[in-house]
Image (tube, rainbow, N blue to C red):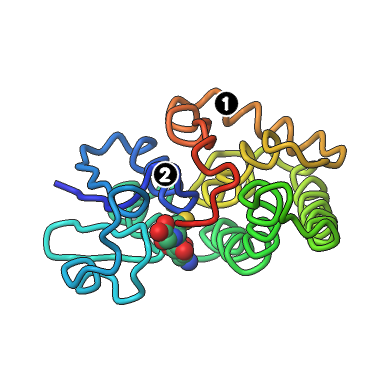
């Protein structure tokens, strides 16, 4: 059976749990990080030398890096559905996964950590404002893309939607200003129809408020 190590409130773990939910796979969740700790333990570091979550084990295979895990699951369990077999079609999804990791996530994490995870008295307002503007620019760009199509890689939901959309619930709910992005809102509404999105992404992240550890 597939095993997933990680904390359910962790953004990168949620991408993987959502994917597993979409694919309807049985899995075992092993709590790691947060109150469970364990990321610095030799057993864990043997699976992921970076000491980060999520980690997936499937039979003899161990995979770390959330987007790589999403790719692996879709390639192995969802051929020609969430994973497009044709490289050209697949690239439509993959570019948004890489964009999420390289461009959106660093700015989104600066905003989430700078605002939500920092106690009010310690917040650096200038840094928050800067991160907020960068996120607004990223989401406006995504909005323009979604004006042309229903999902990031075309007319159908694919693995490309998962990493980018994992940030939406927190972005809209954490209490910072968001721009007018009607196409992103429409996409968010379509994702809300998906059971696994509601189950794994639209979950409380209160435990992270003003928490600067883990
Ligand atoms: N690029 C990595 C980042 C992994 C990462 O930084 N995970 C965070 C949780 S989202 C983590 O392990 N933080 C330490 C902790 O939770 O104790 C990925 O996408 O898997």
The mark found on residue 108 in the picture is none
Left or right, 23 with respect to 107, comes to left
Label 2: which secondary element: loop
Left or right, 84 with respect to 169, comes to left
Is residue 86 among the parts visible in the rendering? no
Judge depth for marks 1 and 2 and give the one in front: 1
**Of the pair 35 and 97, the residue shown nearer to us:** 35
Please report the residue visible at 78 percent of the width from the left and 41 percent of the height from the top. Answer: 176
Q: Is residue 80 above or below residue 99?
A: above
Left or right, 82 with respect to 48, comes to right
Q: Is residue 185 above or below residue 125?
A: above
Quadrant in the rendering for residue 128: bottom right
Q: Label 2: few (<14), some or many (≥20) within 10 Å?
A: some
Q: List the residue tagged with mark 1.
A: 192
Q: List the residue tagged with mark 2.
A: 81
Quadrant in the rendering for residue 19: top left
**Of the pair 164 and 107, the residue shown nearer to us:** 107
**Of the pair 143 and 112, the residue shown nearer to us:** 112
Q: Is residue 17 above or below residue 127?
A: above
Residue 178 pos. (x, y %): 81, 41
Residue 204 pos. (x, y %): 51, 31
Left or right, 62 with respect to 102, comes to left
Name the quarter showing ligand 1: bottom left
Residue 163 pos. (x, y %): 54, 52
Please report the residue visible at 60 percent of the width from the left and 64 percent of the height from the top. Answer: 95
Whether label 1 touches label 2, CB < 8 Å: no
- Mark 1 vs 2, N-terminal side: 2
Residue 199 pos. (x, y %): 43, 28
Establish whether ligand 1 lies closer than 8 Å to the Cβ of label 1.
no
Please report the residue visible at 22 percent of the width from the left and 68 percent of the height from the top. Answer: 41
């Amino acid at each position: 059976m597939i095993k997933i190590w990680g904390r359910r409130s962790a953004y990168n773990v949620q991408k993987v749990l959502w994917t597993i939910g979409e694919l309807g796979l049985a899995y075992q969740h092993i709590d790691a990080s947060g109150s469970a700790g364990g990321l610095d333990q030799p057993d864990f570091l043997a699976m992921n030398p970076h000491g980060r979550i999520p980690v997936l084990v499937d039979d003899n295979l161990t995979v770390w890096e959330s987007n790589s895990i999403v790719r692996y699951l879709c390639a192995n369990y969802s051929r020609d559905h969430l994973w497009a077999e044709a490289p050209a079609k697949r690239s439509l999804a993959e570019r948004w996964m890489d964009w999420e990791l390289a461009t959106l996530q660093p700015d989104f994490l600066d905003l989430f950590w700078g605002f939500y995870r920092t106690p009010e008295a310690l917040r650096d307002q200038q840094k928050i404002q800067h991160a907020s503007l960068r996120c607004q620019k990223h989401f406006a760009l995504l909005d323009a893309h979604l004006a042309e199509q229903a999902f990031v890689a075309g007319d159908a939901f694919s693995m490309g939607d998962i990493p980018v959309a994992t940030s939406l619930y927190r972005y809209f709910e954490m209490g910072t200003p968001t721009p007018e992005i009607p196409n992103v809102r429409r996409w968010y509404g379509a994702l809300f129809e998906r059971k696994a999105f509601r189950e794994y992404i639209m979950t409380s992240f209160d435990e992270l408020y003003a928490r600067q550890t883990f």
